[in-house]
Amino acid sequence: MKNALLLLCLAGLAAAQTETGTQFQPRKLIDMHTAGALPRGTYELDFKFFAEGGVSTFVGVGLTNRFSLGLAYALMRLIGDQDIRGQSFPGAMVKYRLMEESYYMPGLALGFESQGSGKFYRKTESDFGGNSYYPRFYFKSKGLFAVLSKSYLFLGQPLGMHVEANYSVVDNSAESEAALGYAHSNRCMDVSIGADKSLNDEISLMCEYDLALDDNHTRNPLRGYLNACLRWAVVKNFVLEVDFKDLLENKEFEGALPGLMREVRIVYVDKF
């Protein structure tokens, strides 16, 4: 199963493009941003279902063709028989596309996002990670970020590539992000690379690799997180997505190695 998912990911990297079957350029791959932005007067509803019955919601609005913002909130164990827990504070996202893509130059977007991915570990709840990893998301929020996106023509189809640099302001403040006996502190800048490919007007493949320089207390880029997804645009503004996260199973958290994670995502985009 793991090898099959890796082949799927590599196929997406071999021929990728920035447009999907939807009418709008994707603003994100799986967790990393692209230089895409919501058009003016457009809103986005994003629901992600993750491990142990968790649900994350995001509402975004395009105020101009370059500037968009949004709010997010996650509930842990919403589905199941355990007590429901919410994150300590709502997440926020602000994004501005500073430079449009040209023939020679990539598009450039700057922004800030305090919403991470997966479970949120709270300081006051020992059943959510004890006292060593709080308060932070399982996969860190991007914090301050800058992303470059460029498309090329490759084998008759556009090839889109994305590079993101970020510093997770909120999650890096957790007590666990200090060295605590490790060789390195997790409080540093991170880098991600990614690509996306439309197979037809409905189906898309997306891949990304987070070097995880600010996680696992290591600076080894080979210990990063490889993510991939299959995205289906049911209609032009309604998308279903299945995400496969940490295909290389490099994530370490509280001494455990959880392995491959699967998530389901629903995105609806429309105009006011």
Image: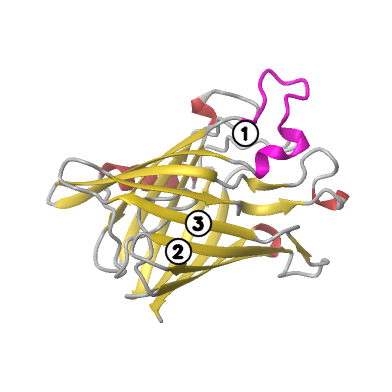
Q: Amino acid at mark 2?
A: Glu
Earlier in the chain: of badge 2 and badge 3, it is 3
Q: Position of residue 163 (x, y in %)?
A: 38, 39
Residue for point 56% across, 55% down: 262
Queried whether the magenta region covers residue 98, the answer comes back as: no
Q: Nearer the viewer, residue 80 or 30?
A: 30
Q: Nearer the viewer, mark 2 or mark 3?
A: 3
Q: Nearer the viewer, residue 70 or 184?
A: 70
Q: CA distance from mark 1 to mark 3?
A: 23 Å
Tell me, what colour scheme is on the image?
Answer: secondary structure
Judging by the rendered image, the residue that carries numbered circle 3 is: 94
The single residue placed furthest to the top in the displayed view is 183
Judging by the rendered image, the residue that carries numbered circle 2 is: 241
Q: In the picture provided, is 216 more to the left or to the right than 134?
A: left
Indicate the quadrant containing the C terminus: top left, top right, bottom left or bottom right.
Answer: bottom left
Q: Secondary structure at mark 2?
A: strand
Q: Quick check: can you spot residue 91?
A: yes
Q: Secondary structure at mark 3?
A: strand
Earlier in the chain: of badge 2 and badge 1, it is 1
Q: What is the magenta segment's predominant secondary structure?
A: loop
Q: Nearer the viewer, residue 105 or 231?
A: 105
Q: In the picture provided, is 54 more to the left or to the right than 236?
A: right
Residues rendered magenta in the picture: 170-187
Q: Amino acid at mark 1?
A: Asp
Q: Nearer the viewer, mark 2 or mark 1?
A: 1
Q: Nearer the viewer, mark 1 or mark 3?
A: 3
Judging by the rendered image, the residue that carries numbered circle 1 is: 215
Q: Amino acid at mark 3?
A: Val
Q: CA distance from mark 2 to mark 1?
A: 26 Å
Residue for point 53% across, 48% down: 245
